[in-house]
Amino acid sequence: FGCSRDELRERLAARGIDTRPFFRPMHQQRAFRDAHPDARVSSPITVRLSETGLYLPSSSGLADGDIERVAAAIREARLGR
């Protein structure tokens, strides 16, 4: 993509666009570990997604202009602007 998830988050934040890191895999969550202390779970794909993914602004009330602004900011961030 041209930058890491965290770099993209910083670049979007500089433009006033809030993001959140992706979910934490189920097998890494405390409730799962507490319920299944002996479970040996390997899930490299979900771990990789959690380390590289992010949530963009989303809402049923998001206006077309907001979507365009987020998309433009992502394109610019990718180019390092």
Image (cartoon, grey):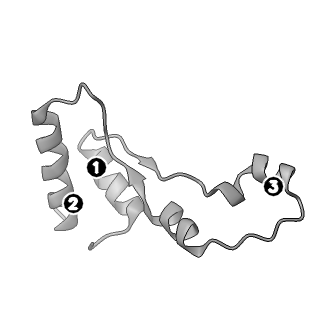
Q: Is residue 12 left or right of residue 35?
A: left
The answer to whether marks 1 and 3 mark residues whose Cβ atoms lie closer than 8 Å is no
Q: Pointer 3: residues within 10 angstroms few (<14), some, or many (20+)? A: some
Counting residues from the start of the chain, the first of labels 2 and 3 encountered is 3
Q: Is residue 46 left or right of residue 66?
A: right
| Residue 24 locus on image (x, y percent) | 59, 54
Residue at the far right in the pictured view: 38
Vertical arrangement, residue 76 with respect to residue 45, above or below:
above
Disc 1/disc 3 C-alpha distance (Å): 34 Å
Vertical arrangement, residue 69 with respect to residue 78, above or below:
above
Q: Which mark is residue 77?
A: 2
Q: Pointer 2: residues within 10 angstroms few (<14), some, or many (20+)? A: many
Residue drawn 52% across the image and 70% down it: 48
Residue drawn 16% across the image and 35% down it: 66
Query: Which quarter of the rendered picture does the N terminus lie within?
Result: bottom left
Q: Determine the secondary structure under disc 2.
A: helix
Disc 2/disc 3 C-alpha distance (Å): 37 Å
Vertical arrangement, residue 60 with respect to residue 52, above or below:
above
**Which picture quadrant has residue 44?**
bottom right
**Which picture quadrant has residue 26?**
bottom right
The residue identified by callout 3 is 33
User: Considering depth in this image, is 39 or 11 the residue closer to the camera?
Assistant: 39
The residue identified by callout 1 is 12
